[in-house]
Amino acid sequence: MDGDDHRDQSPALLRLRNYTADALKVEGTGPPWHRGCVAIAGVLGALAIGQVFELREALAIAPALAVFMTLADVEGPLRLRLATLALASSGMTVGALAGLVLASDPLALGAVFIGLAAIAAVASSIGPPYQPAGRFTLVVALFMSLVHGADAKRLVELALAVSAWVALLRLIENVIAPDARIGEFKSLKEALFTLRAGRWHLYRFVLAYVFAAGLGYALGRMIDAVHPSWVTASVVVVMWSDAHRSYLRVVQRIIGTLAGALITLVMTSLVSDARIIAAIAVVLLYFVPHFIKRNYWLHSGLMLVLVMLSLDIWSGSQFSSHVLLQRIGDVLLGCALALLGTVLAFAGVQERLREAASADAKAAQPT
């Protein structure tokens, strides 16, 4: 009967059903358990570093950078993990300076934004470790454009201090429990080879990526100065250089965001003590490196809860459901634009691949 039900459904409904089923699968493999302890130590240490710098912005920027650096990690030898960290940290520092310096010049910021979006698209086509560095550079630039009057020199020193702290934690972790896996890492030579091999599609993907991200930024600017960063961030982290993975990410981010929003509302309605909320946020940090490896919808939900709780603690005001609803709207708009960009990037490509595979299968059949 189930097979008959499948035959009665249209191809579009079957694809949606399959994508949803794939999106909700939870992978059994992930990074070692102690990676979560390193994530907690990284963020708490970054928070302490921010307090030393005596900048109010540092209390939000330092932990955020530590979270990004936690996400910019691979499983493998220490050399590869430190190289990934250095690449991501350098990119985020450049992005932070660009966003901070050009915040008062929308035209210049827009031009830099387009360039960073193109770099992020190219990095996405290569894969680790360039992919997280390209995306986080753009995301950090967008959010730093919201910071006004900060000392650029002090913020660079802050980024270097947080990077050094995270690098030290990875060194200690590697001494205690080195990774058994080799990990996924491309050298510069391998990265250039990957780009040359896929250059027939690279230009189209870069244009679609920049268009979707730029449209998200422009639509967000029509509302206020905050929305462009959140909308565009959703676009750039969801779009991949693989159509199937992009569609999965869209479904996963939507499901995870809605689930995370519901959990946040329930949690904040039951708990009002800032110390308990802070303790919950620290516990959630443990799962940051695990969920992104196991399933993206879990990661999306976790990050929404973590961000909302952190904003609540940092602002010192009572939790506002209005802010949560705004973020949900930003994510949904970003996912819609990422879906549009994916269609533009891959329209007709899948059909050609299927035709080529069918032709190869026919050619392989005995005559």
Image (cartoon, grey):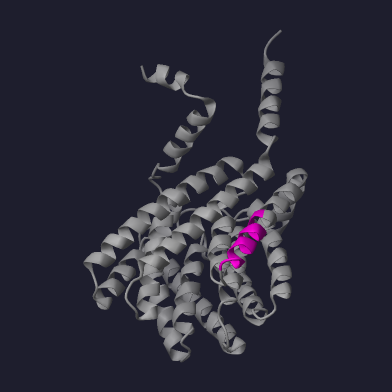
Q: Main secondary structure of the magenta part?
A: helix
Q: Residue 71 in magenta?
A: no
- Could one spot residue 182 in this view of the protein? no
Q: Is residue 319 left or right of residue 222?
A: left
Taking depth in this image into account, of 125 and 172 the one nearest to the observer is 125
Q: Is residue 219 within the magenta segment?
A: yes
Residue 283 quadrant:
bottom left
Q: Is residue 216 left or right of residue 71?
A: right
The image position of residue 66, as x and y in percent, is 47, 73
Quarter location, residue 310:
bottom left
For the point 62% across and 63% down, which residue is it?
217
* In-front residue for pair 36/47: 47
How many numbered marks appear? 0
Q: Residue furthest left?
A: 270
Q: Position of residue 247 (x, y in %)?
A: 54, 43
The quadrant of the picture occupied by the N terminus is top left
User: Can you see residue 102?
Assistant: yes
Q: Is residue 171 above or below residue 232?
A: below
| Residue located farthest toward the front when viewing the structure as drawn | 222
- 52 is higher (above) or lower (below) than 100: below
**Residue 297, how many percent across, how many down?**
42, 50
Residue sitting at 55 percent across and 61 percent down? 231
- Frontmost residue, 330 versus 34: 330
Is 285 or 214 nearer to us in this picture?
214
Residue 104: x %, y % from top left: 66, 81
Image quadrant containing the C terminus: top right
Range of the magenta residues?
212-223
